Amino acid sequence: MDLEYWELLTGEAIEEEEIVCRDIWVVAEVKDGALTPISLEMVGKARELAAALGAYVQSVLLGEGLESLAQELIHRGANGVYLADDPRLVEYHLETYAEILSGLFQAKKPEIILFGATELGQELAPRLAQRLGTGLISDCLDLSIDETERVLLATHPVYGGEYFHVSTFLGAKPQIATVRPGAFRLPFADEYGSGEMEKIAVNLEGIEGKVKVLSVSTGEAQPQVPLSKARVVVAGGRGLGDAEGFALVEELAEALGGQVAGSRGALDEGWIGQERQVGLSDVTVKPDLYIACGIWGDVHHYFAMQEAKFVVAINKNPEAPIFKVADIGIVSDPKEIIPLLLSELRAG
């Protein structure tokens, strides 16, 4: 019932409680002039959570000249984007970013704040949790909402990934979590999506980053992302026949800029190590492209790769279960098909 109507009806004055913003906020990151995939993944997931809460999705960007990226966040599902536009924010500094974000969050009072479990997020999130007097759940693999209690339920690994816990917040607001890259799918880009962009004042008086970048070296090789986060995975199984056949899988993975994996059969044959086995008790993957070469596709393998966006299966046996989940199935010897794929890739 509307409070004003109740006052007119009864003559009793009722004091309204302070209105607290019930939005879900995503702290987006920019790398090489583009939004990082985890930023878009979090916006997509935040959209799902917001639907359960009846809330809006807000995002915040720090840098210079980011209007086009703000528009991309809106197309991916954000209702609004706050821009901290200043040349001093082009380079990340913990002190300056923490100062701007803490001021913004104290003013807007979000209900949930999401960071990527990245170098930036792992530094910023705990410090902001301390400044805002709340808690933090790190490295989340899944997020959901308890609609009855209106709290975030976060699934995260413990003991090096041996087990998974579901944790939540009791009375702490805002609820802050960091999300592991690759945990969620990229949301669909709606070019007709609309939202608001708002520039926020940047006041860095007396605030200066303690670390200064003197030079950037691009000659060093970057560490390989974990298999669980790879965007392209080429996996081989016992159906390849021998080590020479599996070597073709490695060539194909390299040509596609992906990573090599395998089934239990490949592990038993000694072609891969345990850390490369795709299985329920080993590594689960969610790539954009999964190519299964000579893999039978039992239930343990299926559940470990079922969230792949696009699956290509190559197997001589037309009865292989892997074909039931494949977007494209090729009934043939992988040792004949892979060289053809490599030839086409090398030819551009």
Image (tube, rainbow, N blue to C red):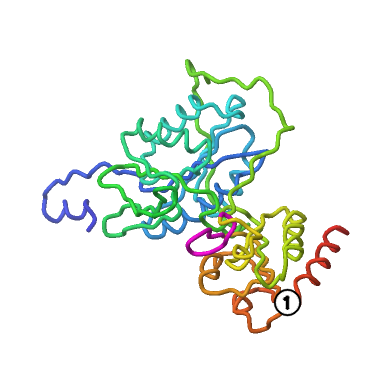
For label 1, count other residues whose C-alpha is less than 10 Å away and answer few (under 14), some (14-19) or many (20+).
some
The residue lying at 51 percent from left, 54 percent from top is 183
In the rendered image, the residue lying farthest to the top is 206
Q: Nearer the viewer, residue 279 or 172?
A: 279
Q: Which image quarter holds the N terminus?
A: bottom left
Q: Is residue 282 magenta?
A: yes
Q: Quadrant of residue 276?
A: bottom right
| 57 left or right of 261 in image | left
Q: Quadrant of residue 274?
A: bottom right
In the rendered image, the vertical position of residue 109 relative to residue 88, given as above or below: below
Instruction: Find disc 1 in the rendering and name its residue.
Output: 330
Q: State the image coordinates of residue 317 (x, y, percent, origin top left).
A: 68, 81
Q: State the image coordinates of residue 286 (x, y, percent, origin top left).
A: 57, 60
Q: State the image coordinates of residue 342 (x, y, percent, origin top left).
A: 82, 62
Q: Which image quarter holds the C terminus?
A: bottom right
Q: State the image coordinates of residue 88 (x, y, percent, origin top left).
A: 59, 24
Secondary structure of the residue carrying numbered label 1: strand
Going by the numbered disc 1, the residue's amino acid type is Ile
Q: Which residues are magenta?
A: 275-285
Q: Is residue 281 magenta?
A: yes
